[in-house]
Image (cartoon, rainbow, N blue to C red):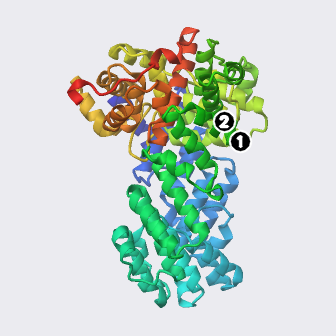
Amino acid sequence: MRLVLFALMLLLLQPAMAGTALAAEPHAERSLFIATWDRLGRGNRDVDLDQVLQRLGDYPLAPYLEWRALRQGLPDASGEDVRRFVERHPNLAVTPLLQRQWLNHLGQERRWAGFLAHWDGQGGTTMDCYRLRALRMEQGVDQDWVEEAVALWTVGHSQPDACDAVFDVLYDRELLSREQRWERIRLIMARDDRQLARALRPRIDRRDRDWLDDWLRLAGNPERRLRDPHFDTKSDRGRELIADGIRRLAIRERDVARELLDRFRERQVLDRETGLDLQRQIALRAAWSRDGEAAELLAGLPAEAVNNDVYEWSARIAVGQQQWERVLRLTSMMPGELAGTGEWRYWRGEALARNGRREEAEGLLEELARERSYYGFLAADRLELPYAMNDATAAPDQERQQALSERIEFLRARELRAVNLETEARREWLAGIDRMNSAEDLFQAAAMAIDWNWYDRAVFTANRAGLNDAVRLRFPIAWRQDFQRSAEAEGLDLALIYAISRKESAFIADARSHAGALGLMQVMPGTARQTAAGLGLPSPSDRDLREPTANLRLGANYLAEMLDRFDGNLIMASAAYNAGPNRVDGWVRDNAGQPAAVWIENITFGETRDYVKSILAFRAVYDWQLNGEPRRLRDVMPERMPGPRRSEG
């Protein structure tokens, strides 16, 4: 390996001597590209790029070296350099990125005429603010400018530093009214960003600064400030503060929120519409946390306060309490778009059956059982019907795929993967499918991704094209040996590991979540280190966790640990994989003895509730693919869910 690297260095340092050797090597262009890419990335400016590009000829990735060199030297580049690059490579996936970077550079350098000359209407908030700054300097401020600036200012979060100069114009010229300034405070306090609200205090009207101080004190201790308000409760600002304080109390102190709502209603402080909104929010908060009074609070809402959320959560609470007559009544009252979802068709069917209306129940559930979904599978279980996989994955057209593979975007995408530039490869793939007009081409592209073992692009492309019944593309059998090895090492169900990975990452091997979870099974680095230590393995790096083999080994071990902790109960273990075992311990205590499907509906975290349903459905899909016949959901859904083990109290 050292000899190979040394040889590559010689090729770059002595290009004239290396020309003949390059032509004879089967992967010479790729090797030269990698070596040059790395040198450019290290800031080496002695690369004779023109000569390298000449040797690369029509190698698909040659323009990427131009891009990297230009991007690295952007501070010293000219607008003409960027313009020529854009003209030569208009369809390169990173060309728009270079344009954004160049505009950002021009903005930072305050080269406003150049910025406007290159502006193409694209970009985010930073570009929008640079554009307004450029227009101000080059053309002045008009009414359109003011309206755009005010729209950028009126948000509930901090804006980029590039916007500060725009907002200074609004402040200095008194272009913001009192109500416009207060509207931003409203938006910020709705996000509970008190630090930003304090920072904006000098910018609001002097008459509102004391109101903001009162609001900040109220946010810190809403009950105390509402019981003894030191502000005019019947003024517009006062009513606003009272409503916000009650909303805050509704999250954790619902009894106090209800008491104070009644008090201010009696004093006619709150108008009817606000009072109804607060009453609804208190009832829904109770429902979300499965408060024992939730059903009563929801039922007590006046008709004007009832919306789809109220219908849905009233029915969900009724399901959780197994009040089947109430479920039947509530589902009959739901608007059509809500009643027609798989969830409420299933639970209405269940309620009909429980109320002795079996013929109606079977008709409803039989129709639902024709769908490939969690609720469709539950309906099939109830009626002893086969699962409807509805797979419409057509046979790939090799000639059409070959034609697609020769398009420049896909040539680049495949070669970028070969040189481990995965992000750039995904950009090229996206550029390729963005230029497709037919569903058939998109299908063939997704099938081609499977052939390339690029499983995440197969899923992405099939989903983007709306190929819902292309099951083998949307649920590919990825990295079969690695998955099999990890399943066998932990004694796990192979279909379950596939289901977890499909849900967690959609097979993006280098995926990273907002929380920092990594890889196929979205393993947290801290969890990975603990798991590796238990297995006697070296502590993994973030890079290790982006490799399928290591990620699956550690993720499967952690999943096995969750299954062991919950005595093999797949529902509890998958919930723990998503939300953590401690939270699941609480659900185990609160919902012991419930039927499995009802237990799932009583999971208080919406994300985890949907996650468990997806895992059960995805496992069935993978079981069907791997074994030809899926095992039933009912096989892992006990009639009565267990409670805490004795050792857990």
Q: Is residue 619 above or below residue 239?
A: above
Q: Are marks 1 and 2 in contact (CB under 8 Å)?
A: yes
Q: Secondary structure at mark 2?
A: loop
Residue furthest to the right in view is: 438
Q: Is residue 557 above or below residue 417?
A: above
Q: Is residue 390 above or below residue 186?
A: above
Q: Residue, x 23% and y 30% (percent of image)?
A: 648
Q: Residues within 10 Å of mark 1 (few under 14, many from 20)?
A: few
The alpha-carbon separation of the residues under discs 1 and 2 comes to 7 Å
Q: Nearer the viewer, residue 367 or 259?
A: 259
Q: Nearer the viewer, residue 101 or 150?
A: 150
The residue labelled by disc 2 is 341
For the question of whether residue 642 can be seen, the reply is: yes
Q: Residue, x 45% and y 65% (percent of image)?
A: 246
> Which percent across, then down, holds residue 311?
61, 45
Q: Residue, x 71% and y 28% (percent of image)?
A: 443
576 with respect to 131 (left or right): left
Q: Residue, x 48% and y 79% (percent of image)?
A: 238
Q: Residues within 10 Å of mark 2 (few under 14, many from 20)?
A: few
> Which percent across, then down, holds residue 630?
56, 13
Name the amino acid, label 2: Thr
